[in-house]
């Protein structure tokens, strides 16, 4: 019996490994299905109560802001000043987005021209390499056009944080969409066996909540506009939610950072720990806002049937499982257009490293262009520490899922606390510290201004002394 038990345990481990392997390599299949949180909230009173708790916290923060504004300044702005500052110069951001959208639309006529050239030269194989090079040049020119103007404009003059994040995220979204269309339709232009999509379907793909191109997507029968309005209301509420968190929990600690030449180390450490809870709340709100409310609103408007934009990442016991489930939209693109093409050539470890490198660099570029400085905190957290944790938690996480799920949540709390501390510190240091000849886009100013010192005459008293 003991041998049978050992044999069964070995068999179960092997089966679990196969399931994980199949989950990692399964192809993207679009079917009509709801998002996990939609199903959970509708089917569980417990999850619905947790949702209501977050709504109540928003209302409490709203009332707290009203009372603070009224007592402190004798006016009521309901957090609108933070929203206005965060999304300042919306017209400039909209123009940059409209430019990228126009470039993406202009790529479709280029596909038609490329298909015509492929048809004309089908009888002349000697010209085929030249046509392929022209197609690659057109693809590269389109990608350069999408990137060049927004990067130049944001580097030339800083745009408000909310607007610049929107512009840079949309810039990468258009780039990834063009890659997906090129990968699917480029070979068609040369062989002529499968017709190109219509412009209507191409435009639908540009707005659809997916980065993987398909000729057909499952569609729902009608648009439930009440649900669209509900999700848009959630997006607006979460924007205010994060602005309240910024105004009530972040700015009191960091808005004056750099106004004095010296700051005590204890004040910095205390501020970092104070940002842990609002940081993770903002992390959860950002996930819900973008990957649930925003994408579901667009899916409902466009009758896009597959709403599995994420999976139950909150139950993950390994970092590889978390990365696959956190954002299926981006993960599917990275898998299909980077990992799968490179894995047979470079092997799985190197391909995984390249995927992490590309993703972490893209995240850091978004933050650098949005904040107006390069401070690679997220790059180190995601591209270095996150990558190291993938093999470390792979086997151990399956053996002790509860313990490693706890460890992952600890990393979420402290990681987001650091992000919500270090980036505001650098932002306000550059804003409050006097200009210097050594100021650089790539060298953090918060390292030299203000000077972090220990508290004078600081002593430690043993707290256990009262028991003896």
Image: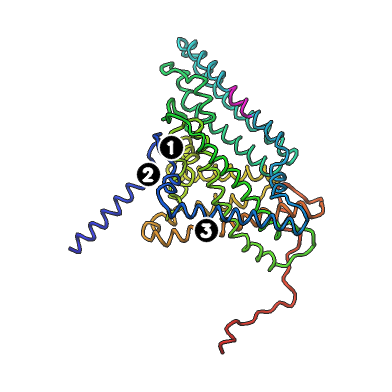
Q: Is residue 236 above or below residue 130?
A: below
Magenta stretch: dominant SS? helix
Q: Which residue is mark 3?
A: 411
- Residue 265 horizontal/vertical position (percent): 70, 67
Which numbered disc covers residue 23?
2
- Residue 150 horizontal/vertical position (percent): 67, 34
- Visible in this render: residue 324? no
Distance of mark 2 from mark 1, alpha carbons?
Answer: 14 Å
Give the image quarter of residue 447.
bottom right
Give the image quarter of residue 206.
top right
Secondary structure of residue under mark 3: helix
Q: Which residue is mark 1?
A: 340
Give the image quarter of residue 318.
bottom left
> Can residue 399 be found in the magenta stretch?
no
- Residue 121 horizontal/vertical position (percent): 49, 12
Distance of mark 3 from mark 2, alpha carbons?
Answer: 24 Å
């Amino acid at each position: 019996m003991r041998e049978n038990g050992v044999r069964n345990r070995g068999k179960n481990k092997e089966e679990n490994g196969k399931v994980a392997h199949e989950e990692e390599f399964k192809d993207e299949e679009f079917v009509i299905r709801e998002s996990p949180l939609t199903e959970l909230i509708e089917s569980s009173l417990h999850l619905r109560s947790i949702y209501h708790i977050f709504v109540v916290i928003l209302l409490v923060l709203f009332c707290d802001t009203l009372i603070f504004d009224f007592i402190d300044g004798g006016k009521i702005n309901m957090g609108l000043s933070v929203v206005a500052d965060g999304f300042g110069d919306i017209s400039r951001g909209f123009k940059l987005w409209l430019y990228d959208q126009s470039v993406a639309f202009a790529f479709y006529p280029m596909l038609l021209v490329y298909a015509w050239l492929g048809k004309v030269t089908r009888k002349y194989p000697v010209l085929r390499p030249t046509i392929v090079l022209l197609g690659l040049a057109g693809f590269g020119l389109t990608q350069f056009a999408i990137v060049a103007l927004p990067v130049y404009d944001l580097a030339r003059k800083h745009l408000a944080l909310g607007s610049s994040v929107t512009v840079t995220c949309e810039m990468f979204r258009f780039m990834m969409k063009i890659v997906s269309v090129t990968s699917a339709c480029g070979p068609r232009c040369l062989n002529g066996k499968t017709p190109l999509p219509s412009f209507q379907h191409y435009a639908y793909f540009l707005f659809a909540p997916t980065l993987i191109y398909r000729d057909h997507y499952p569609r729902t029968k009608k648009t439930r506009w009440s649900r669209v309005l509900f999700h848009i209301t959630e997006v607006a509420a979460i924007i205010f939610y994060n602005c309240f968190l910024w105004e009530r929990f972040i700015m009191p600690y960091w808005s004056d950072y750099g106004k004095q030449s010296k700051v005590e180390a204890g004040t910095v450490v205390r501020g970092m720990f104070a940002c842990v809870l609002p940081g993770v709340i903002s992390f959860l709100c950002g996930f819900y806002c973008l990957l649930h409310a925003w994408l579901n609103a667009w899916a409902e408007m466009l009758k896009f049937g597959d709403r599995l934009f994420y999976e139950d990442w909150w139950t993950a016991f390994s970092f590889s499982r978390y990365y696959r489930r956190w954002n299926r939209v981006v993960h599917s693109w990275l898998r299909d257009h980077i990992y799968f093409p490179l894995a047979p050539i470079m092997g799985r470890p190197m391909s995984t490293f390249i995927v992490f490198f590309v993703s972490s660099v893209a995240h850091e570029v978004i933050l650098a262009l949005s904040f107006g400085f390069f401070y690679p905190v997220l790059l180190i957290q995601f591209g270095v520490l996150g990558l190291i944790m993938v093999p470390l938690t792979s086997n151990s996480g399956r053996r002790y899922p509860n313990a490693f799920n706890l460890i992952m949540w600890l990393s979420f709390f402290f990681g987001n606390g650091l992000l919500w501390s270090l980036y505001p510190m650098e932002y306000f240091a550059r804003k409050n510290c006097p200009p210097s000849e050594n100021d650089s886009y790539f060298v953090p100013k918060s390292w030299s201004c203000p000077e972090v010192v220990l508290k004078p005459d600081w002593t430690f008293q043993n707290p256990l002394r009262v028991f003896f």
